[in-house]
Amino acid sequence: MRYLPKSPAERKQMLKAIGAKAIDDLFAIIPAEYRLTRDLDVPRQQGESEIVSYFKAAGQKNATDYASFLGAGCYRHYRPVVIDSLVQRGELLTSYTPYQAEITQGTLQAIFEFQTMIAELTGMDVANASMYDGSTGAAEAVLMAMRVTGRQKAVVASTVHPEYREVLQTYLRYRDLPTAEVGYVAETGRVDLKALDAAVTEETAAVLVQSPNFFGVIEDIPAIAEIAHKKGALLIVSIAEAVSLGVVRPPVEADIVSMEAQSFGVALSYGGPFCGVIAAKEQYLRQMPGRLAGQTVDGNGNRGFVLTLSTREQHIRREKATSNICTNQALVALMATIFLTVYGKEGIPELAEHNLAKAAYAAKTLSEQPGAKLLFKDSPRFHEFVLQTQEPTAQWTQRLLDEKIVGGLDLGRWYPELKNATLWCVTEVVARETIDHAAKVLAAAPVEA
Amino acid sequence: MAATVEQIERKTLGKVRPHQTQNEGLVFEKSAPGKRGYKLPPLDVPEVDAKAALGAAYREEKAGLPELSEIEIIRHFTRLSTWNYAIDLGMYPLGSCTMKYNPRVNEFVARIEGLAEAHPYRPESLAQGILEVIDLLQKCLIEITGMDAITLQPAAGAHGEFTGILLVRAWHESRGNARRKILIPDSAHGTNPATAAICGYQVENLKSNAQGGIDLEALERQVDEDTAALMLTNPSTLGVFENEIHKIADILHAKGALLYMDGANMNALVGKVRPGDFGVDVMHLNLHKTFSTPHGGGGPGSGPVACKKFLEPFLPTPVLVKKDGALHWDFNRPQSVGRVRAFYGNTGMFIRALAYILANGPDGLRQTTEDAVLNANYIRKNLEDLYELPYKTPSMHEVVFSDKRQAAKGIKTGDIAKRLIDYGFHPYTVSFPLIVHGALMIEPTESESLEELDLFIDAMRSIAKEVEETPDLVKSAPHSTRVSRLDEVQAARKPVLRWRPVSN
């Protein structure tokens, strides 16, 4: 086997040194009746060329030549080449969690830079080293708010990503922690502030909203914060599209921000691995889940970095820890850090403006087609919008697929009240001609008899 | 002052000689206004006045991100990388972490366009390729574990534990009583009790017996009608196989409790024995340990959960099913615990893990396990005369010593670990498991050659000698790194968790 660095003679020599006759002597402690005496029924050992062929064939079955208007928590942006060439350096790729600080300063400094960039972008004081993804990060943020406030209830906007809400339910359900859901205003697609005001009580630990929300609409964060804070609840803002922070005002009124950083240079990869991160006001630091890198000095006064405040974590506190999280998404956080360095202070706003312009053009062009209408038309948006058609979604979806275009995502699955409504995402990688083409196909509805 | 030629030392210690590393400030300190590392193509649609479009939601002040050119970015992260130790540089014997070789073909295939660029909401008809990859990996993992069903959704080991214990809870609830407590051996990873707690269970500690294993009498006493499950790591964190595992399962099952297995140490079992065959009801795997996906400085991982048939209805939604010759996601799972993560899991890790399984085949997987166990026993044999072996039970894939003899000289496991760095190795796992005072937990994995093992053994033996002769040398180690021991107390007392510009 090509990954195993031993010759048959060396194996014999080692067995002899140990004082064993055969390798199975070392497995003698396993009761005989459980020992596997046959080969595992998995595919036979394959050469590297066979493995590459297998996965290339799988990739082709996936159909690569389709244009796409899908977003909804998973966004296609251009990924600068330097990201992949850097994260494939073995020193970064094949290193463990930096518990031994003297020989992991590279990883530790990069985490410190990531934490700084996330804090800068979100307007929070501090950020952690990463969470699994945006959905679990949001759920952990709610649990964090419950620890901070000592309260047990959460209020969640129905405009938060539906799968994030499902994950939150899973995290809370078995602890008998109730959540109340607050809807949106039909005209604006924004959280219904009156309903929110009614739902938030003295028992509410946290209000969770997403901005830009699942419809691509930017929420009125200052107004929501006021409602939450009035009753002593914390405001958690979930951000699924991190690039939006290039042009959208950061949620500085929030107490906790839970962000999905996939947009910063991370491949779609059928939904993962992505990169969640929690940022917060400094006073909530001790209740934060996940790893944190901090600056310190060594015995000679050199600046250095270590994992710190680990008394919050499971390997020290066990059942009293702030979370059970251990492994996080370190390498993906590094990808985001490199992406943010490449685009930098001027590039992130410029990139965000390109997204804004592309989506504005697409929203206008598509909604001008006969039978099509832009929902939540007058609300501020980033690069997603909801289109409603008279023609059933399934029909034009198929017409687009015939033209090798994946159109907007049908919202009926999560919002039955939104009939024939689809969520479209247009990032900087979508060409104008693709938008024009999609509009033409959309317009070509068969004439009804 | 200039050094004389005689003062410049290029001596070898263990398997290393000192080597210069470049200094590099924080990325923010390298920034200067007007430098660029990007160029966007011209916009092919009309520009939008962002401020007018967004109104009050417009960001007035730009985030304080750095401004650098591309060459500086390459140098910055390359320089940082040279400050890291890595498997690619040498042995990384962290017990319980299974730091094995991360095959490069895994990285190559995970980046194939049709897989890497697949959107999770694309129509299933356009996603059959990735679904087939997921399906084949699921089948392989079910066969390797001897279980009946699986979910790949959990993002890491601890997330898998969470999912597995939720399955346990949902099953008990379906029978009318969630039960109150989870039993956890005192040798367990910290994630186990933390998981039980976030699933709403009380943690009850189970003391290990004189061999470091489960004390069957204690277990019998402690398991009752209120016990939901036992979370067991097998082999244990001592690297010892629970040879009375069938009795453990029987005791639990007799009281209606379930056996959860933490699969952190699965690298000792693959192809030799299957948890499903010895009574485990539900378990998680760590694709980033046993199945060679890279640790990447702390993640991403992937923590699939495999279970027996009776727990299948409770698996997270959606579940992959085959219908009319095509693969589909089934969302209609009324008894499901719900989602544990958006989308379908860390799919990029599934691709890598399957590539590893294909590269090995049944014979390679078995040989891998045998070599991992052979390596650990070889280290044990060659160090047990100098380091205290608190439990004499046969070792599987890792061996745990204690610093008892060295501690008598004032040298602790943490000191020996730091000195090991000077010899060119990453330290073993320090002070864990907790049931061993001053533990040295060594897991070589199958990826080490005899030459590398011998160098490690030589280094450990040399350090044992230093403890006797020059203890201060060990106590003040490491001596060859860019930074010496860092002040962790200061880091925690006055946390500096982000860079801030120096204000003038």
Image: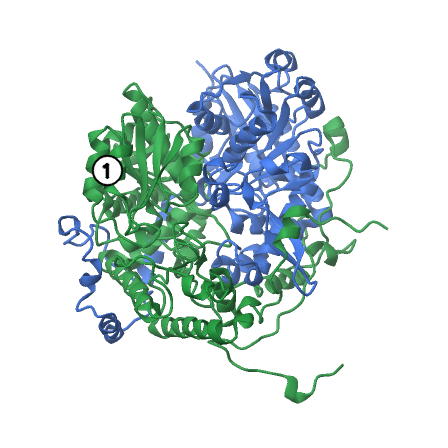
Q: Nearer the viewer, residue B387 or A35?
A: B387
Where, quadrant-wise, is the N terminus of chain B in this rendering?
Answer: bottom right
Q: Secondary structure at mark 1?
A: loop
Above or below for A127 versus A177: below
**Occupied quadrant, residue A213:** top right
User: In the image, what residue occupies the spot 47% across and 61% down?
Assistant: B413
From where the camera sits, is residue B344 visible? no
According to the image, label 1 marks what residue? B148
From where the camera sits, is residue A218 visible? yes
Q: Residue A388, percent across and down?
A: 54, 20
User: Which residue lies most toward the right here?
Assistant: B504
Q: Chain of mark 1?
A: B
Above or below for B272 versus A12: above
Q: Nearer the viewer, residue A64 or B275?
A: B275
Task: Tell me: B297 left or right of A350.
Answer: left
Badge 1 density bin: few <14, some 14–19, many ≥20, Cα 10 Å: some
**Occupied quadrant, residue B277:** top left
Above or below for A412 versus A49: above
Q: Which chain is green?
A: B
How many numbered discs?
A: 1
Q: Nearer the viewer, residue A185 or B100?
A: B100
| Chain A rendering hue | blue
The amino acid on which the numbered mark 1 sits, given as a three-letter code, is: Asp
Q: Nearer the viewer, residue A281 or A185?
A: A281
Q: Residue B391, percent across and down?
A: 31, 57
Q: Residue A187, percent across and down?
A: 63, 15
Q: Residue A33, percent across and down?
A: 13, 48
